[in-house]
Image (spheres, rainbow, N blue to C red):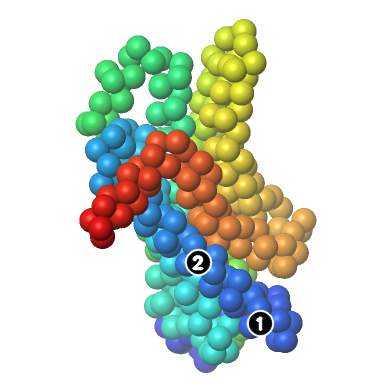
Amino acid sequence: MRPGNQSSVSEFLLLGLPIPPEQQGVFFFLFLGMYLTTVLGNLLIILLIWLDSYLHTPMYFFLSHLAFTDISFSSVTVPKMLRNMQTQHLSIPYVGCVSQTYFFIFFADLDSFLITSMAYDRYVAICHPLHYTTIMRPSLCVVLVAGSWVIACACALLHTLLLARLSFCADHKVPHFFCDLGALLKLSCSDTSLNQLVIFTAGLAAIMLPFLCILVSYGHIGVTILQVPSTKGICKALSTCGSHLSVVTLYYGAIIGLYFLPSSSNTNDKNIIASVIYTVVTPMLNPFIYSLRNKDMKGALRKLLSKKTHSSN
């Protein structure tokens, strides 16, 4: 193998999750169930929003895109992980690994921007209700979603192009269940200082700034509702912000701890656990937290089921 020439690396080996061999079968069915729940739950969200005209509002417009993003985000990594667990075929082609890295970063950033757009929508609805229809007009919603796609694509492309220029030496074992950017950089025998710099700078723009915007938005929401001197107002504040902030904390907490804290404070097993949280667990929980606890979504589901019942009779 010729050092300094990344074309000599034809494939990587994904070592997967740190699970004993005798427990592989149990975890395979566990993650398979979680993945199917993610796909079916988010598809149900998209279907309900598409069929029910009452849900054709900015909030559910963002939610439908978030549901599609969550399906795609999990599909980038989980099917390959399940295949590796079942067949013990750990190899992934070089091109496939770089492509997986691109789509992983793309959908992770897109998820972040869409959650931020939803937070802004809730801020306008609660803090400026009289101007909601004027501010959250359809053209603005389209611009926010289209802008999210374009910026996420640009960020992912930047990271991927910088990754593709690196050279990889003899060690091609990735101690992860997918082609994680940080894990790949540790395998490179090239200078990765530029890559690390871009991770922090682009990461601040794609992750930290949206996270701060979400916190500010929900902070204003909480202050506005708490100004209503009643227990009902406090309960409304908790129901409006609590469930959303729980997912935000879970999602951003794992990413920030993994990519923005010093690597010396994180073991590889902790990195993998954090990755499982925001690639598998959070997309699975989103249908329950964002939608299935929502009375509008429940109403749309009841109407859909009643239509099915009447049509079958």
Q: Is residue 255 visible?
A: yes
**104 to 53, vertically: above or below:** below
- Give the quadrant of residue 277: bottom right
Q: Amino acid at mark 1?
A: Gln
For marks 1 and 2, give the CA distance. Answer: 16 Å
Q: Amino acid at mark 2?
A: Tyr
Q: Front-most of 217 and 236?
A: 236
- Give the quadrant of residue 10: bottom left
Disc on res. 35: 2
Q: Front-most of 270 and 161?
A: 270
**Residue 129, how many percent across, how many down?**
39, 15
Q: Front-most of 74 and 286?
A: 286
**Residue 45, how many percent across, how many down?**
38, 50
Q: Residue at x 53, y 72 (%)?
A: 32
**256 to 263, vertically: above or below:** above
* Secondary structure beneath label 2: helix
According to the picture, the residue beneath numbered tag 1 turns out to be 24
* Secondary structure beneath label 1: helix
Q: Residue at x 33, y 14 (%)?
A: 131
